[in-house]
Image (tube, rainbow, N blue to C red):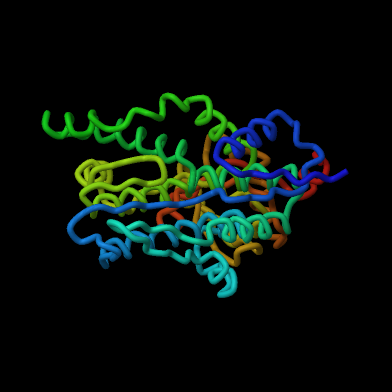
């Protein structure tokens, strides 16, 4: 009998993720989120008295864009938010309430956004695949463990970049809580490796956590769910330009529009995805795309037939950079393997 799994907390979500990875959710066909996830931002400072500044609004808009990108990657295998329909954007749009006190911001409809995410991925794949992706989305975008892991990762990077002892002391004094959740972090990383969509959604969560931190830097101090940061600490963690690339996978069926082999060391291809309608210019990875694989590409051009490609790329705010084709298969090969 099909089972609906209720998720009422982050602990429930990690328990479900552990069962998912252990192959123990065979009868589960739906997830019901009840009161979780939440996103609460408590902003303190002279400018925050039941009010929000334009700079904070700008960072919240970036958080909204990150939600759009995660959805677009899971639903359309495309980080460009232009791939979303107007209706999808409306359903995914946060409705933020400004509460009493300093400035307490809480989107009222995070659970509804998750439901829209479930609907989107559930329409294109079986529960044994989409359940993991939804759990990664909720935990990666809205969970404390993933946010603490993001902060810890940023902390390590900034310590290496610190130019003086004062900067190092500021960063070293920051939270060290993520080490307590190391097993859960391992679960998230393991789950992100189960499919291309899972990897992309987990990678895109970096932008969501980055946007939250940029909100905090505008304040004297901020509590983001269960994590507290001073504005000075947050500013130190996001001191670099926000245009940071994340690694994504764009595997799928493509038509090869052109092969440029004028440089024997660096073959280039123009590939078009019927799923996204986008053309990508990519390099061929010389170490793996050789011999028969290049013959398959050549036939794809001359005979105008689609091929299945594994494509690694970097994404910056919806734009594809540094795409590399690392594996080529004819459609007949894929059918035979299945």
Judged left or right of residue 241, residue 118 is: right
Toward the bottom, the furthest residue is 86
**Residue 307: image x %, image y %?**
69, 52
Q: Quadrant of residue 278?
A: bottom right
Closer-to-camera residue (47/255):
47
From the image, which quarter does the N terminus lie in? top right
| Residue ID at (36%, 48%) | 210
- Quarter of the rendering containing residue 159: top left
Is 164 rendered above or below residue 245?
above
Residue displayed at 33% across by 53% down: 243
Q: Is residue 200 visible?
A: no
The residue positioned farthest toward the front in the image shown? 100
Of residues 174 and 107, the one drawn nearer to the viewer in this rendering = 107
Does 95 sit above or below residue 203?
Answer: below
Q: Is residue 151 visible?
A: yes
Residue occupying the point 80% across, 48% down: 332
Report the residue at 30% width, 30% height from top.
156
User: Residue 165 falls in which quadrant of the image?
Assistant: top left
Residue that protrudes farthest toward the right in the picture: 1
Total numbered labels: 0
Left or right side of 239 for 116: right
Judge by depth and name the residue closer to the eye, 322 or 287. Answer: 322
* Quadrant of the snapshot with the C terminus: top right
Whole-percent x and y of residue 297? 64, 51
Find residue 14 and report its horizontal and vertical position in percent: 59, 35
Q: Nearer the viewer, residue 308 or 41?
A: 41
Q: Position of residue 106 (x, y in %)?
A: 43, 58
């Amino acid at each position: 009998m099909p089972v609906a799994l209720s998720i009422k907390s982050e602990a429930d979500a990690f328990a479900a993720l552990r069962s998912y990875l252990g192959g123990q959710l065979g009868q589960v066909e739906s997830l019901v989120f009840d009161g979780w996830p939440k996103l609460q931002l408590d902003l303190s400072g002279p400018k925050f008295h039941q009010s929000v500044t334009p700079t904070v609004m700008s960072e919240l808009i970036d958080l909204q864009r990150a939600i759009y990108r995660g959805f677009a990657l899971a639903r359309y295998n495309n980080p460009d938010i232009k791939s979303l329909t107007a209706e999808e954007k409306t359903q995914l749009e946060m409705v933020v309430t400004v509460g009493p006190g300093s400035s307490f911001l809480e989107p009222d409809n995070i659970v509804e956004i998750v439901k829209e995410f479930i609907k989107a991925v559930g329409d294109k794949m079986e529960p044994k695949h989409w359940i993991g992706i939804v759990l990664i989305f909720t935990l990666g975008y809205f969970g404390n463990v993933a946010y603490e892991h993001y902060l810890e990762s940023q902390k390590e990077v900034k310590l290496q970049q610190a130019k003086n002892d004062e900067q190092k002391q500021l960063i070293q004094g920051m939270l060290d809580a993520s080490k307590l959740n190391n097993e859960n972090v391992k679960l998230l990383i393991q789950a992100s490796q189960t499919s291309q969509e899972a990897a992309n959604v987990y990678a895109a969560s970096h932008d969501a956590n980055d946007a939250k931190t940029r909100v905090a830097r505008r304040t004297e101090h901020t509590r983001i769910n269960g994590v507290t940061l001073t504005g000075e600490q947050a500013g130190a963690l996001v001191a670099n330009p926000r245009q940071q690339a994340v690694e994504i996978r764009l595997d799928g069926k493509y038509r090869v529009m052109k092969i440029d082999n004028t440089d024997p060391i660096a073959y280039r291809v123009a590939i078009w995805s019927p799923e996204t309608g986008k053309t990508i210019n990519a390099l061929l990875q010389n170490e793996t795309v050789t011999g028969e694989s290049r013959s398959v590409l050549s036939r794809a051009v001359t005979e105008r037939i689609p091929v299945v490609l594994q494509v690694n790329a970097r994404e910056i705010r919806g734009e594809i950079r540094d795409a590399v084709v690392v594996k080529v298969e004819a459609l007949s090969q894929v059918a035979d393997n299945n």
